[in-house]
């Protein structure tokens, strides 16, 4: 989830009982919800870790130190580990990719809503992408209705943002992982548009 985890107060009604939902693992101890989960499908297991960066975002616990602690524990049972790093600064995301190279299968950035063009397999076998992109309307500005966003930029007055309607786009990445080693073999960006399909 990331920096918007607590935006809707209803989340407190179910976050402790929903194992498919993860919030940043580097939130302080005692925070509701889980920072990691294990996804099971077709007899396979995949560990998922969510972390949040600190550059230009609220100050929380060190994501690098928390990543070390969590991955040391998860790697005792799981070969395939994915890290969703919700961060603003590209440099912080790239640093996390290098920090975890060879210890996890994938480090993928989220938060900025714009898919980056730097998908790569790092030297020790970790797939990396600075930002996966967003799912939502492509006719707005980062998923928000553009008139309000433009008014905010041109007047600096407070505005109420609304989710944009219109033609959608879907961004993601597809990673082929060697199950015996947990190393990534291939990473491929996915960009689906409502009226066409693009796969790099």
Image: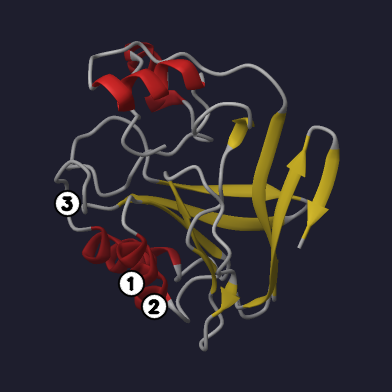
- Local packing at callout 1 (Cα closer than 10 Å; few below 14, some 14-19, many 20+) is few
Image vertical order of residue 25 relative to residue 173, above or below: above
Q: Earlier in the sequence, mark 1 or mark 3?
A: 3
Between disc 2 and disc 3, the foreground one is 2
Give neighbour class at mark 3: few <14, some 14-19, many 20+ (Cα, 10 Å). Answer: some
Distance from disc 2 to disc 3, alpha carbons, whole Å, reads 19 Å
Q: What residue occupies the far right of the structure in this picture? A: 196
Does residue 78 appear left or right of residue 177 in this picture?
A: left
User: Dot 2: few (<14), some (14–19), or many (≥20) neighbours within 10 Å?
Assistant: some
Quadrant location of the C terminus in the rendered image: bottom right
Q: Nearer the viewer, residue 165 or 87?
A: 165
Q: Is residue 134 above or below residue 168?
A: below
Q: Position of residue 90 (x, y in %)?
A: 36, 61
Q: Which residue is mark 1?
A: 95
Q: Residue at x 80, y 52 (%)?
A: 198
In the foreground, 55 or 143? 143
Q: Nearer the viewer, residue 153 or 140?
A: 153
- Is residue 103 in sight in this rendering? yes
Left or right of 156? Residue 195 is right
User: Where 115 sits versus 150, above or below?
Assistant: below
Disc 2 element: helix
Label number found at residue 61: 3
Q: Which mark is residue 98?
A: 2
Task: Give percent across and percent down for residue 122.
Answer: 52, 82
Contact (Cβ within 8 Å) of mark 1 with mark 2:
yes
Disc 1 + disc 3, Cβ < 8 Å: no
């Amino acid at each position: 989830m990331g920096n918007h985890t607590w935006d809707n107060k209803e989340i407190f009604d179910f976050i402790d009982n929903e194992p498919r939902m993860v919030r940043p693992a580097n939130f302080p101890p005692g925070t509701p919800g889980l920072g990691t989960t294990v996804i099971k499908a077709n007899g396979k297991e995949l560990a998922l870790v969510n972390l949040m960066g600190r550059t230009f975002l609220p100050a929380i616990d060190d994501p690098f130190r928390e990543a070390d602690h969590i991955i040391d524990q998860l790697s005792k049972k799981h070969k395939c580990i994915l890290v969703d790093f919700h961060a603003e600064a590209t440099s912080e995301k790239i640093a996390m990719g290098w920090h975890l190279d060879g210890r996890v299968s994938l480090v993928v950035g989220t938060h900025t809503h714009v898919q980056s063009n730097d998908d790569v397999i790092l030297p020790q076998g970790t797939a990396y992408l600075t930002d996966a992109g967003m799912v939502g309307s492509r006719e707005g500005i980062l998923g928000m209705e553009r008139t309000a966003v433009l008014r905010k930029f041109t007047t600096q007055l407070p505005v109420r943002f609304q989710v944009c309607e219109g033609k959608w786009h879907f961004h993601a990445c597809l990673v082929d992982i060697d199950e015996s080693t947990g190393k990534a073999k291939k990473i491929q960006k996915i960009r689906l548009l409502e009226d066409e399909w693009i796969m790099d």
